[in-house]
Image (cartoon, rainbow, N blue to C red):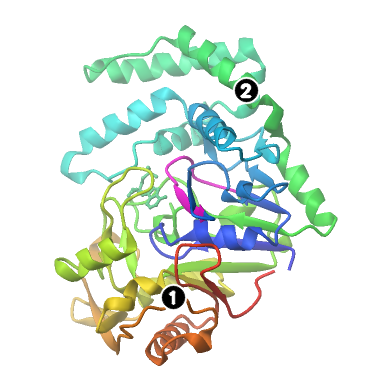
Amino acid sequence: MAAVVIIGAQWGDEGKGKITDYLAEKADMVVRYQGGSNAGHTVVVDGREFKLHLIPSGILYPGKTCVIGNGVVVDPEQLVRELEELARRVVDTAGLRLSKGAHLVLRYHRLLDLLEEERRGHGRLGTTGRGIGPAYLDKVGRRGLRVADLYDAEGFRRALSLNVALANEILAAAGKETLDAAALAEEYLALGAKLEPFVADTSLLINRALDQGARVLFEGAQGTLLDLDHGTYPYVTSSHPVAAGACLGSGVGPTRIDRVLGVVKAYCTRVGEGPFPTEIAGEEGDLLRERGREWGTTTGRPRRCGWLDAVALRHAVRVNALDGLAITKLDVLDALPRVKIAVAYRCRGQLLEEFPTDLASLRACEPVYEELEGWQTGIQEARSLNALPAAARRYLARLEELAGVPVFLVAVGPQRHQTICRQEVF
Ligand code: IMP
């Protein structure tokens, strides 16, 4: 396998960072293809915790090439901050490559993101406030600024001043503070100078690496149900976390992809607003949050917790054409006497086996649960499926049956070595 795509099969925060980190060891190159600093990966290496938002977690392996593809929206302030933090902790960042074509998230995008949320009031989406929606809006509106523009100072100043004027009109009308375009341009040009050594034609780089037989791991951010087209619109992000996004966001064609792996948490979480059929209110939800440390990496918000949703999972298997699953955080369920899986929904008197992506139907859905026996034993030391308690193996087997694809990997703890490999991915 040369080109493997990893995607989140739920609402993000499935533990992709840990799985990517595990697989990155075997990859020559790790590529991020969409989203921006709304994503947050927490990776623990030798007891040291790293929180990354833009830089692929593969950077933690010395000598690995890590690409921020054209489909990512890049906040230069955040990227420079991450580079400086890694340098401070003596992590070599020489392998980073930043696409010339990636769009920039600029300060007005963040301000407009917050303003839009404020205006939505009760209808707010619960965005991360990182300017993601407004940045992608400028991209499709054909007025966005890209990484390459940072190296044409005059052109950048001109384009930025037009965009800031537009943003200032909106901000001023809402009684908000406005921005000084000239000062902002100089700030960004200075950040651009810091990023210049990393800038490259990354589509060329990735395709050439594949031509030479390199192993490339494409790392999705967020999850399938937050996809602009295939998620729970409008409670979604503004990019394409699904596997198809890997091609568009990195400049490789679909026939080059060899395998697609979906990362599935052993239960579900969602951060932000929007429908979540298997959400659990009360004590059981709190227990999952505590045991799973379910607070957002980016915003620190408590994540909404719920049972594993096989209906939503089947949707993810279909729209991503998943070859297999990586199950994460199975150990979080260790304490529970019973575990539930939603196998269907009841919606307006009908039994639904397929995930409806329209809001009205989703809101009317009640999950139909199957209950399985819990294992009530610590499993963090297990290194093979056979070492798991029978009830945990039954849970995984049922999950495979419901998803219709095999489990490749199972994570039983946050550390790199706490991973069971049932089938090699590369
Ligand atoms: P945005 O991406 O900041 O525009 O937020 C849109 C929706 O996606 C909100 O519900 C966010 O909470 C959610 N979201 C964005 N990034 C992530 C992530 O990395 N994990 C989980 N949810 C996310």
- Magenta run includes residue 376: no
How far across and down, in percent of the image, does residue 181 sit?
45, 11
The reply to whether the C-beta atoms of the residues labelled 1 and 2 are less than 8 Å apart is no
- Magenta run includes residue 33: yes
Q: Is residue 337 left or right of residue 356?
A: left
In the rendered image, which quarter contains the N terminus?
A: bottom right
Q: Which residues are magenta?
A: 32-44
Q: Where residue 194 is drawn, which disc sits there?
A: 2
Residue visible at 33% across and 77% down? 334
Q: Is residue 400 above or below residue 303?
A: below
Q: Is residue 205 left or right of residue 251?
A: right
Q: For the residue labelled by badge 1, is the local secondary structure a helix, a strand or a loop?
A: helix
Residue visible at 34% across and 41% down? 128
> Is ligand 1 less than 8 Å from the beta carbon at label 2?
no
User: Closest to the observer: 231 or 371?
Assistant: 371
- Residue type pointed to by label 2: Lys
Q: Reading the chain from its start, which is encountered first: label 1 or label 2?
A: 2
